[in-house]
Amino acid sequence: MLLEFRVERFKNFQKELIFKLDEIKNYEFSVDAVKDDVVKTALVYGMNGSGKTNLALAIFDICLNLTDNEKNYDHYNQYINLNVDSNAIFYYKFKLGSSTLEYKYEKDTPQHIVREELWIDDTKIIYYDHISHEGSVTLEGTETLNTDLNEKNISFVKYISSNSVLPSNTANNTFTKFIDFVNRMLLFSSLEKNFYQGFMLGNEKLSSAIIESGRLKDFEIFLKNAGIEYNLVAKTVGEKKLIFCKFDKKQANFFNVASRGTCSLTLFYYWLAKLDDVSLVFIDEFDAFYHNNLAREVVQKVLKSKAQAIITTHNTSIMDNDLLRPDCYFNLFDGNIKSFANLTKKELRKAHNVEKMYRAGSFDE
């Protein structure tokens, strides 16, 4: 799981932003929101322009370095903060089994790493300077690895992962778990149709994916439980498999009659079916087109999945201790992000109305 993330000089984050997911309090309610003393499901609030989407892009910058999965470089325009002329810095700390792994790097563009460092259980294992092309790695099995990447524009960590046979030991197994974790990270947003980054490569058509997985009836039930009733049927038009809505006298393409909110919900359903294979999911503005009850149901479904989740929203109606808890609600403001629990000196209990407190400015530092 991701324990901590830091970023500096990236987009609107000029100074270092520290996002800690391991500062857990001793709450005895909403325990499903925490796993192994780490926030499993986080809701992030913030004013427009505070950087919620930039936070998502910053966390998923690591996928640009280490994976061959879906990448959207267009979202990384204006990469370096406009008030500085030095490199962006990214830092990740993961809990992987009984070990911790830290990965830190500097970049001057989305596709060019300047420096990388990696620690396992506080011991530096990997270092590489992409300017001087000098580096080192102490993982067993890399003794004969060529460490000169002079002609390769590639992460040294990814290069090690792709070109080494690592025998089983604590450090190697932790490193392998790290690579696997990053490969299974997923960012998606319904605000820009089917925008996603990480986890897989290429764009599946939502209709054909649901039909071919044999989940069309399940999808119909999912919509019905959300208050949307359609009689859905599969049709082949040319070479395409499409979802149609069956009415008394006619049939229509589902996406031609569905509201924007229903289309957004369809996208969520598509990814929900994959969440148990996802390590970390970041859902940006997940409920932009949902009513309050539906937004709550969506969060509850994410809670039940195996994935660690970070969700951004403006919806304060789902801000209560029956859903999550004060150490799982975060406020992003002025380049800082902290949990509600760390933004007040008051000892918060389940009976506290955190939405009312938030609206009153109790969590504004």
Image (spheres, rainbow, N blue to C red):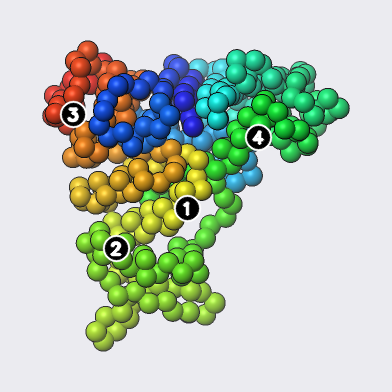
Which is closer to the viewer, label 2 or label 3? 3
Q: Position of residue 339 (x, y in %)?
A: 31, 23
Q: Is residue 253 above or below residue 113?
A: below
Q: Residue at x 80, y 28 (%)?
A: 142
Whether the residues at callouts 4 and 2 have beta carbons within 8 Å, the answer is no
Label whose residue precedes the other's in the sequence (2 or 1): 2
Q: Position of residue 340 (x, y in %)?
A: 27, 23
Residue topped by disc 3: 350
Q: Is residue 251 above or below residue 45?
A: below
Q: Is residue 83 left or right of residue 318?
A: right
Residue topped by disc 2: 223
Residue topped by disc 1: 274
Q: Is residue 34 above or below residue 93?
A: below
Which is closer to the viewer, label 4 or label 2? 4
Q: CA distance from mark 2 to mark 1?
A: 18 Å
Q: CA distance from mark 4 to mark 2?
A: 39 Å
Residue 238 — which label? none
Quick one: 13 or 39, which is closer to the camera? 39
Residue topped by disc 4: 176
Label whose residue precedes the other's in the sequence (4 or 3): 4
Whether the residues at callouts 1 and 3 have beta carbons within 8 Å, the answer is no
Q: Residue at x 52, y 80 (%)?
A: 238
